[in-house]
């Protein structure tokens, strides 16, 4: 997704912790957070077909209606631009999803894939929110179940307290504007 001299828009960017990595890769970066834009109703201050990559990480579960978010992402992405959304997977986090009182709307893999499809995205791909695992963990039929059971590996108990067990219940869904 990194395109030399490309551009990225990070929706719900918080402290813009990703910015330096994109800048290092010669990509222009713009980020918008809750104090700058209401993604449920505001237009993004970007031109049509103007960016290569749109990110929305840990945001969609905090809004009631994702329609504006998806239509704005589609409008602002150029042809073959990529939209990446990361959120908890309701199927595996339903017991504690609402423990974060700011969560308002849960998604499953199927519901989020359908949302991408309904807004015109193609080549939709999904995978669990894991870090640095073999391809098998992202592509097998039981990938979400395995991710929900997989503990942190390779770290000693001195570094990772016993309460941190890993077990990813998040998902990424990616769509292409064609």
Image (cartoon, rainbow, N blue to C red):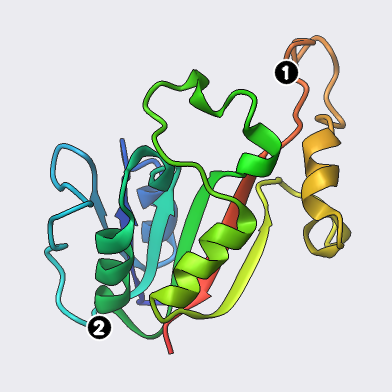
* x and y, in percent, of residue 68 in the image: 24, 61
Compared to residue 155, the image places residue 172 above or below, namely below
Query: Compared to 21, does 154 lie above or below?
Result: above
Provide residue 115's location: percent of width, then percent of height. 46, 66
Dot label at residue 36: none
- Seen in the image, is 75 located left or right of residue 52? left
Residue 8 percent across, percent down from the top left: 34, 65
**Which of the 4 image quarters holds residue 54?**
bottom left
What residue sits 46% from the left and 22% below the top? 100
**Quadrant assignment for the C terminus:** bottom left
Q: Nearer the viewer, residue 80 or 63?
A: 63
Residue 164, labelled with which disc?
1
Are there few (<14), some (14-19), or many (20+) residues within 10 Å of tag 2?
some
Count residues near mark 1 (Cα–Cα under 10 Å), then give few for <14, some for 14-19, many for 20+.
Answer: few
What secondary structure is found at the residue carrying circle 1?
A: loop
Can see residue 2?
no
Residue at the image position 84 percent from the left and 34 percent from the top: 149
Give the structural element (helix, strand or loop) at label 2: loop
Q: Do the numbered discs 1 and 2 sit on residues whose CB atoms are within 8 Å?
A: no
Left or right: where 32 falls relative to 100: left
Between 109 and 132, the residue placed more toward the observer is: 109
> Which label number is shown at residue 49?
2
Q: Residue at x 52, y 50 (%)?
A: 86
The picture places residue 6, in percent across and down from the top left corner, at 36, 75
Could you tell me how many numbered marks the image carries? 2
* Residue 150 position by quadrant: top right
Q: Residue at x 83, y 30 (%)?
A: 151
First-in-chain label (1 vs 2)? 2
Give the alpha-carbon distance from disc 1 to disc 2, as whole Å: 42 Å
């Amino acid at each position: 997704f990194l395109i030399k001299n490309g551009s990225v828009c990070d929706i719900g960017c918080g402290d813009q912790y990703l910015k330096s990595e994109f800048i290092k890769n010669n990509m222009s970066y713009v980020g918008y957070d809750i104090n700058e834009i209401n993604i449920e109703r505001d237009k993004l201050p970007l031109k049509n077909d103007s960016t290569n990559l749109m990110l929305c990480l840990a945001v969609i579960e905090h809004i009631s209606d994702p329609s504006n978010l998806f239509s704005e992402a589609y409008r602002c992405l150029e042809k073959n631009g990529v939209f990446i959304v990361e959120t908890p997977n309701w199927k595996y986090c339903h017991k504690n999803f609402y423990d974060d009182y700011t969560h308002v709307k849960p998604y499953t893999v199927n519901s989020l894939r359908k949302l991408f499809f309904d807004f015109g995205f193609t080549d939709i791909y999904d995978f669990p929110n894991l870090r640095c695992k073999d391809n098998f963990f992202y592509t097998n039929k039981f990938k979400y179940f395995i991710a929900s059971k997989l503990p942190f590996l390779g770290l000693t108990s001195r570094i990772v307290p016993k309460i941190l067990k890993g077990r990813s219940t998040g998902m990424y869904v990616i769509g292409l504007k064609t």
